[in-house]
Amino acid sequence: MGLFEFLRKAGSKALTKKNAKTVKTKEIKKLEEEILNKQKLILLKGVVDSLGIKVKNLALDLNGDKVTVYGQTKTQENKEKIVLALGNVSGIGRVDDRISVTNPQPEAQFYTVKRGDSLSKISKKYYGSAKKYKIIFEANRPMLKDPNLIYPGQVLRIPAL
């Protein structure tokens, strides 16, 4: 036996795109889920990259609504910003933080914004003065672009003074 030649356009129409779309085997569904998961991981990596924070050996793993983040960064602040950026993505319910820090610092508190909150109101609660809202704003940059643009459900860093 050897190589046989056939007319490509003749014969059964079993391999048309229309027929291919109707086949949804377990293997194909699994492949589609894997591709979607990889696309989501690329998008989540883009969220981290957009922060401009250097992360050595950055790796992400996605399992449902939980993202696990691995790597090494210089400061606790950078680590917390990465966790918050990932956690504040719609569809992410949990972040498993596996980032190590080369220069440990005290951890900040996290606060979930409620309806009616403002940075001034949050500042008064944590620092006793509404005028210190800029500390919270700066602690959450670049995720926050404007101190007036926070939303319910968003999680913010509240650094210690």
Image (cartoon, rainbow, N blue to C red):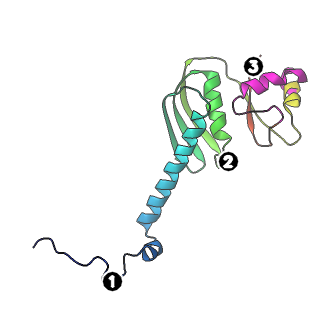
Q: Which mark is residue 12?
A: 1
Q: Is residue 133 visible?
A: yes
Quadrant of the snapshot with the N terminus: bottom left
Q: What residue would you read off at disc 2?
A: 90
Quadrant of the snapshot with the C terminus: top right
In the picture, measured across the screen, residue 130 lies left or right of residue 157, that is right
Q: What residue would you read off at disc 3?
A: 160
Element at badge 1? loop
Q: Position of residue 13 (x, y in %)?
A: 37, 81
Distance Cα–Cα, label 1 vs label 2: 46 Å
Q: Position of residue 143 (x, y in %)?
A: 70, 33
Measured along the vertical axis of the image, is residue 75 above or below residue 153? Answer: above
The quadrant holding residue 80 is top right
**Number of on-image labels:** 3
Amino acid beneath label 3: Ala
Magenta residues (range)? 125-148
Amino acid beneath label 2: Ser
Measured along the vertical axis of the image, is residue 6 above or below residue 153? Answer: below
In the picture, measured across the screen, residue 6 lies left or right of residue 136, that is left
